[in-house]
Image: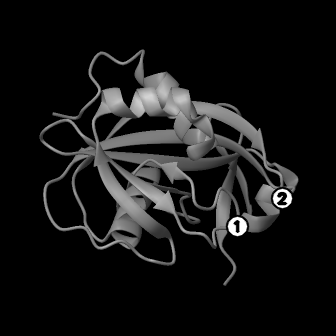
Amino acid sequence: MEIIIPLSDTAGNITGYEEKIEVHKKGLLHLAFSVLVFNTRGQLLLQKRADGKYHSPSLWTNTCCGHPNRGEEIGEAAERRLAEEMGFTCTLTHRFTFHYRAAFTNGLFENEIDHVFFGTYEGAISPDPQEISDYRWVDMDDLQSDAEESPEKYTVWFKEILKQLHSLPAITSR
């Protein structure tokens, strides 16, 4: 199935659309989102990407991530993808946006304007096994320590998000 995602300028304005795999092959600047869901104890829900993902397989990352579809608002896309990947919904709040670029060993690239959303959730989780091989709740201090000691276990964008969190006044959405 062909997935069309929005291309972007450095200010985050949509400049066109392209097929997702082509965007990642060419390293084109595009829009993305990352969702961080916390429980009421302030723990973050992580997912381990499925072994079959086209890049960054088997790495730990934020609760979910993805790209908006053509004509879809970024917040709506984040809500949609959270339900698709993790099997639940919650209220999401946009917290910050950043740009990053990364090259992968398989010849693909990320070049994203990443919009980061926070949510709070307590309840059942039903991850899509095509997307996620494992998940867990983690204390932020333990996560920061582990990411510093073993950065190879985490996706490149999630490590960037962890750096960004240091500049925020409060980590959770509570």
Q: Quadrant of the N terminus?
A: bottom right
Q: Residue 78: tell me if it is visible.
A: yes
- The reply to whether callout 2 and callout 1 are in contact (CB within 8 Å) is yes
Q: Position of residue 80 (x, y in %)?
A: 38, 66
Q: Which mark is residue 54?
A: 1
Query: Up-down: is 79 above or below 14?
Result: below
Query: Up-down: is 165 above or below 124?
Result: above
Q: Residue at x 45, y 77 (%)?
A: 129
Question: Mark 2 Cα within 10 Å, few/some/many (few <14, many 20+)?
Answer: few
Residue identifier under label 2: 106
Q: Position of residue 149 (x, y in %)?
A: 54, 29
SS at mark 2? loop
Q: Position of residue 51 (x, y in %)?
A: 60, 69
Seen from the viewer's position, the closer of residues 26 and 151 is: 151
**Snapshot quadrant of residue 141:** top left
66 to the left or right of 172: right
27 to the left or right of 69: right
Query: Up-down: is 98 above or below 31?
Result: above
Q: Which mark is residue 148?
A: none
SS at mark 1? loop
169 to the left or right of 160: left
| Mark closest to the chain's N terminus, 2 or 1 | 1
Q: Residue at x 41, y 76 (%)?
A: 128
* Residue type beneath disc 2: Asn
Q: Position of residue 78 (x, y in %)?
A: 41, 56
* Residue type beneath disc 1: Tyr
Question: Mark 1 Cα within 10 Å, few/some/many (few <14, many 20+)?
Answer: few
For marks 2 and 1, give the CA distance.
9 Å
The colour style of the image is: one colour
Q: Residue at x 26, y 21 (%)?
A: 170
Q: Residue 97: tell me if it is visible.
A: no
Q: Residue at x 28, y 49 (%)?
A: 137
